Amino acid sequence: MPLLEARDVHGGYGGMNILNGVDMSIEADEIGVIVGPNGAGKSTMLKAIFGLLQVNQGEIRLRGEPITNLAPNKLVHMGMGFVPQENNIFPSLSVEENLEMGAYIRPSGVSRMLEQIYEFFPPLLDKRRQPAGELSGGQRQMVAMGRALMVEPSVLLLDEPTAGLSPLFMNEIFERVKKINAAGVGILMVEQHAKQALAIAHKGFVLAAGYNRFTDTGEALLNDPEVAKSFLGG
Amino acid sequence: MNELVFFINNVVVAGSVTGSIYAMGAIGVTLVFSIMRFAHFAHADMMTLGAFVVLLLSLAFPGAGSVVGLPTAIVMLPIAMVVTAAVAVGIDKAFYKPLRSHGVKPIVIVIGSLGVTLMLQGLLRLFAGTSPQNMYVAERKEIYRLELPFEAVTRPVIVTEPQVILFILVVAAVVGLHLFLNKTRTGKAMRAMSDNPDLARASGINTNHIVSVTWIIVGGLATMAGTLLSMDVTFKPDLSFFLLLPIFAAAIVGGVGHPYGAIAGGFVVGFAETLAVFNWAVLLRPFQERLPDWLELPNNLAFVGTEYKIVVPFFILVAILVWRPTGIFKGKVI
Ligand SMILES: Nc1ncnc2c1ncn2[C@@H]1O[C@H](COP(=O)(O)OP(=O)(O)O)[C@@H](O)[C@H]1O
Ligand SMILES: [Mg+2]
């Protein structure tokens, strides 16, 4: 049974549908990467999974259980974490408070989880008392991912975790994503850096105009001349 | 030297009292704004309502104070805080929450709160009448006269019992709020929701619960401020007329969304008001001989007459909106 499965998802922000039948499926130990041009509906798809907008048609399942249109806080309880593309930290809260808020629904294990997160993102340890809004872009992204990891989710949705980062930081974030996945977290990630992201992906989904143009393994998509021509910049 | 005592009584004491009341009111306005993103106009009437609940309870149990050796109103204050907090949560559920869940623009909720203002004022008049009432139902208001140990000083510094209690409770409330917001899980979640409500929801924070907690704190603080003000002067059902403008000015001066800014703003507006109505001629009179002959001191040298002191917060409000709309602590712009 797939960890996360979306079938024929249609939905939008109230007006016209943005998603016109998206299919996606990842297994528990996989990294799925969504690529596609700007405005294709990649972020919208993640929001639809996380219950942030109305799904009008189709179905989304987590470990076989239907979760279509469930509220975000229910999904957090069911083991789903979401890191939005923008505004993904609490800027005036300290780094540690940001992480604590990630564990809001499960306050018992906070100190153990904090230790793990600091071990995983060492730069955050020194900055733990500093307001998260004062951190560099890469460190903010670590805070954002750390916050979502605090409840030990079984699936993590990441929306462009490397947006605006230098290539050095980008590689570092991808390394972390691989490590998180190796620790047993299924990952569904939207990425602009399509080539690098598909290189670490088990599954890839090329979205355009609100539906799947291509769906295959990351490797197969990278080697597909048609995908390369239209979506990976040749 | 008596002039100095006059200054202490009319500016230092009076300004601290007014500032404390405005600060507590402004904290309430700022908390509602940071969590629900709307300007809550009915806040001043919540202060009046809280004081009225204390008055009712005091009239019902006038002997309660003498048992513990405090004014009856102070004994009734905690109960009234709970009652008013419950009313505040109820008002939100009945009037503001339906608007919020329809996803209306903030201005619609602001207008809703104007409706609540009118409703509360009507109810207060209906049950409290229109004339001022003394909050000291059973006992006498203690007045402390502190003689200063200087020979030239013959007049005492005057502080009343409710003023002393006010200072103690304001410090307690501010320290308590600080600890709550920075040390408790719910308090941190409140700050998180104020920072980024969407992310708070995505973290599994129950935002409805946070909204209720906010109203409980706001209702409690409003009751405290309204009661102590009414004890110091008298209870009036139209108290809010004199509070609304200064507490909003204080919240905006401090930077909306900053509880500490609201405290600073409260004292800025409170002291500005007392300094503006202070008769400066009193302080200048001892130097009369040294002033040139042609300069004769008028009897009253205040910037504005006491009856017009409401123009002071109005002026501050206009000035801050023109000069620095985010307030001194860089808050959000309403
Ligand atoms: N909050 C919103 N309300 C209405 N339309 C939106 C909203 N967010 C995005 N859209 C629209 O949805 C479409 C897809 O956007 P998005 O999913 O963000 O694209 P991307 O693939 O670049 O992440 C775009 O046309 C965008 O204008
Ligand atoms: Mg996007």
Image (tube, rainbow, N blue to C red):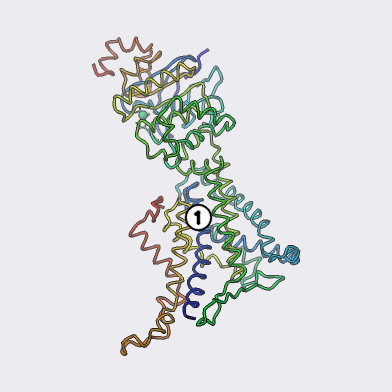
Kindly indicate the quadrant of the structure image that contains residue B83. Answer: bottom right
Q: Observer-nearest residue: B146 or A107?
A: B146
| Depicted A26 relative to depicted B35: above or below | above
In the picture, measured across the screen, residue B246 lies left or right of residue B291, that is: right
Find numbered disc 1 in the image and state the secondary structure of the residue it sits on: helix
Task: Name the residue located 34 percent from the left edge and 14 percent from the top edge.
Answer: A199
Determine the residue located farthest toward the left in the rendered image: A234
Q: Residue furthest bottom?
A: B293
- Seen in the image, is A122 located left or right of residue A67? left
Give the x, y percent position of residue A163.
33, 29
Q: Within 10 angstroms of label 1, few (less than 14), some, or many (20 or more) residues?
A: many
Classify mark 1 as within 8 Å of ligand 1 or not, answering yes or no: no
**Which three-letter amino acid code belongs to the residue tagged 1?**
Val
Name the residue: 38% across, 15% down: A201
Residue B238, can we see it? yes
Relative depth, front residue between B92 and A158? A158
State which image quarter holds ligand 2. top left
| Residue to which mark 1 is pinned | B29
Chain identifier of the residue bearing label 1 in the image: B
Q: Is residue B214 left or right of residue B261?
A: right
From the top left corner, tell me how far across and down residue A128 is, in percent.
45, 36
**Relative to the observer, which residue lies in front, A201 or B67?**
B67
Q: Is residue A118 above or below residue B237?
A: above
In this image, A37 relative to B246: left or right? left
Residue A160 in view, yes or no: no
**Displayed quadrant of residue A188:** top left
Give x and y (percent) for residue A68.
52, 25
B96 is higher (above) or lower (below) than B1? above
Q: Position of residue B173 (x, y in %)?
A: 57, 55
